[in-house]
Image: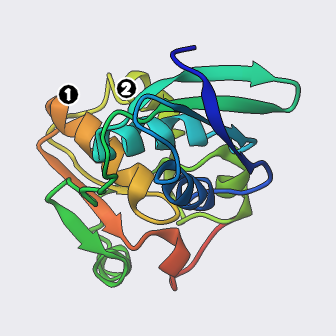
Amino acid sequence: MDGPTALTIDARGLSCPMPIIRARKGIDTIDVGAVMEVLVTDRGAPADFRNWCLQTDQKFLGQVPEEGYSRLLIKKVVTETKEKGRVFPHEISNADLAALITAGSAPVVIDVREEPEFRAGHIPGAVHVPIAEIEAAVADLDRNQAYAVICRSARRSDYACQIMDRLGFARVQNVVPGMSGWAGRIDK
């Protein structure tokens, strides 16, 4: 660990975006150089927090697995925590994606949520790739194919789009606002 733990945020039992929301409120209460630990059960949270730290210029120190949950350690390195927001420039709305699906001309939909979220309901035909596995899972995909990447709130999918863009995928779009606002058909 890098510095004393100044604050513990218990976000066990919560899913995206709630652990980040709690951490966002907490980090501004500690001093620069201090470490905040966030207790999480959401398996997507480590990837969410890595991305959040990139977005806020804080430092993700790592993940410590515990029985039934993980401890995520974040070091505060800048005084003011300002999120840059979604940074991937190519987005598609839920309504536009639904229209493409209805017309039969939809891009390949990649759902980056965790397994329980995906099982609870997903866009028919969506390819399930949890965010933590995105780099390895897309390695053999066609880089010229059109892809629409979705998660619950467009945060994880933004991060996944950035990764795919970095890997040379030319036609990737982030689905906004994501499954939290999806009104189309879903499969379970």
Residues 5 and 49: in front is: 5
The relative height of residue 183 versus residue 112 in the rendered view (above or below) is below
* Front position in the image: 141 or 73: 73
Numbered tag placed on residue 167 in the rendering: 1
Q: How is the image coloured?
A: rainbow
* Residue at 32% over, 45% down: 79
Coordinates of residue 133 in the picture (x, y in percent): 49, 28
Q: In which quarter of the image is residue 95?
A: bottom left
Tag 2: amino acid: Glu
Q: In what element is the residue under mark 2?
A: helix
Q: Mark 2 points at which residue?
A: 135
The label on residue 107 is: none
Q: Where is residue 157 in the image (x, y as percent from the top left)?
A: 38, 52
| Viewer-proximal residue among 186 and 165 | 165
What residue is drawn where x is 73% and y is 62%?
Answer: 120
What is the spatial separation of the Cα atoms under label 2 and label 1, in whole angstroms? 8 Å
Where is residue 175? Give x, y as percent: 34, 66
10 Å crowding of disc 2: few (<14), some (14-19), many (20+): some
SS under mark 1: loop
| Residue that lies at the very extreme toward the right in this rendered image | 67
Total numbered badges shown on the rendered structure: 2
- Residues packed near mark 1 inside 10 Å, few (<14), some (14 to 19) or many (20 plus): few
